[in-house]
Image (cartoon, rainbow, N blue to C red):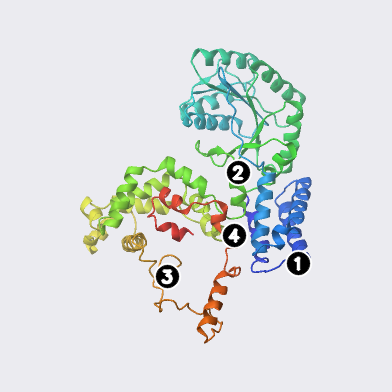
Amino acid sequence: MFATLSDRLADTFKNLRGKGRLSEADIDATAREIRIALLEADVALPVVKEFVGAVKERARGEEVSGALNPGQQIIKIVNDELVSILGGETRRLRYAKTGPTVILLAGLQGAGKTTLAAKLALWLKDQGKTPMLVAADLQRPNAVQQLQVNGERVGVPVFAPEAGNGVGDPVAVAKASLEEAARKLHDVVIVDTAGRLGVDAELMQQASDIHDAVNPDEVLFVVDAMIGQDAVNTALAFLEGVGYDGVVLTKLDGDARGGAALSIASITGKPVMFASAGEKMTDFDLFHPDRMASRILDMGDMLTLIEQAEKTFDQEESSKAAEKLLGGGDFTLDDFLAQMQQMRKLGSMSKIMGMLPGMGQFREQLENFDEREIDRIQAMILSMTPAERDNPKMIDGSRRARIAKGSGVQVSDINQMVTRFFEARKMMQQMARGGGMPGMPGMPGLGGGAGKRQKGKPKPAKGRRVSGNPAKAAQEARAASEKPAAAAANPFGNPDEAGVDYEQAAAALNLPKDFSKFLK
């Protein structure tokens, strides 16, 4: 959703790379580009003015003028201001001290309330809660049936005493749900209310009556992130007519410009609490302003990736695979298939790779990545005998022809897959043992074939003369090492400064510990 904004900001920051000092003209030009990028992303004008004003004011201050790398300091300021307009800190649900916690969902028809109710129920279930869904949308055709189907999919009971389709009293249903929850010991009640195609008095009154009947602990306003500026107008109307505690953004995986997400929290003063970014029931989580800002600036979202990996991966199986990888040649195609299947549980490969820092420049390749390629690899491996998977070296020409026929691919595809497996295994073993990256001489921290030189003699930088005086040469080398390498720096700053624990990331992704150096 934020691809256009991310690309525009990246182009803006490229102009700052390597500058030792920023002039007033540089700051004005950068602010102008940021303003255009935000307006093109459909961010509300008052938010744009406030954002750009804050960036310019801080850019003229001591934190930039006294910085070793002013360009990266500007990026840090933009990141801080993005976090601020997105709501600052992560806002979590408040639970009732006694009795069931009541969560009321409100919003326009088509925003995805009914589907989101089931997603929220599944998320709460994973948190150790025992939620119950309440079908209080009795007007939209088949809304009750839709909630029942979704409740069955996530394994959460649905309280639906009325069939709906224009029949029944939603206020009475909401009241009765509290007694049902107390009787069956549910600790969270999620009330799905009716929406309209537009804001009207009847909608507001019904939502207000249900609010008074159940006295909810949290009122969540569900808004479609793809409707642009109108999302802000609707949010303000609901805030005035019903009132709510937080916002839930749906359809964040869409191709709209995303300005609503950057505007609502700042204009309404209510935090974005949850975000839904997909059709699966698991495509739902807490909204973290800092992580969203990091994604927009193409600094990745390693923390979310680590959390998902920790929930998905089997630690025991991962440890066994790592031991085999370090053992020499015992890592087989069965182990490779098991690891690949665990990775698939995280979601699509393009989504996983998109969470890594700096992947914005490969967005087109990620979008065009064919997820079926993984299915083809799995079919090829499963078409092999156990002996062939255990020892791929025994797969000769006739065996490859049989495997290709069994998996519906060409013999050349089998050749490529087996060759890539051996290359990947060799590379991972070398990295795990500190042997470096094959074919990548001088890879920082990996010792990948860097040329030998005498101890104590620094290698001269290209285009720089070194004094023949040993004392002076040592002084020049020391000064060069202390100078900020602005030209070679990541345009989005050092990822470590964004709070990324690379060793933790490598461990969570089942990679050898030394692979954390490669992530850097």
Q: Quadrant of residue 56?
A: bottom right
- Label disc, if present, on residue 263 of the rendered structure: none
Upstream in sequence: badge 3 or badge 1: 1
Which residue carries the number 2 mark?
Answer: 252
Upstream in sequence: badge 2 or badge 4: 2
10 Å neighbourhood of mark 2: few (<14), some, or many (≥20)? some
Which residue carries the number 4 mark?
Answer: 493
Front position in the image: 233 or 59: 59
Q: Is residue 30 visible?
A: yes
Give the image location of residue 182, x and y in percent: 53, 14
Marks 3 and 1, how far apart at CA: 39 Å
Q: Quadrant of residue 360?
A: bottom right
Give the image location of residue 339, x and y in percent: 36, 49
Marks 1 and 4, how far apart at CA: 20 Å
The count of marks equals 4
**Marks 2 and 1: in contact by CB < 8 Å?**
no
In this picture, is 29 found above or below 299? below
* Residue type of the residue flagged with mark 4: Gly
* Residue type of the residue flagged with mark 3: Met
Which residue carries the number 1 mark?
Answer: 23
Nearer mark to the viewer, of 3 and 2: 3
* Residue type of the residue flagged with mark 1: Ser
10 Å neighbourhood of mark 1: few (<14), some, or many (≥20)? few
Give the image location of residue 101, x and y in percent: 57, 22
Residue in view at x 64 percent, y 17 percent? 214
Marks 3 and 2, how far apart at CA: 38 Å
Secondary structure beneath label 2: loop
Give the image location of residue 10, x and y in percent: 64, 60
Instruction: Name the side, left or right, on which 392 lies relative to 53.
Output: left
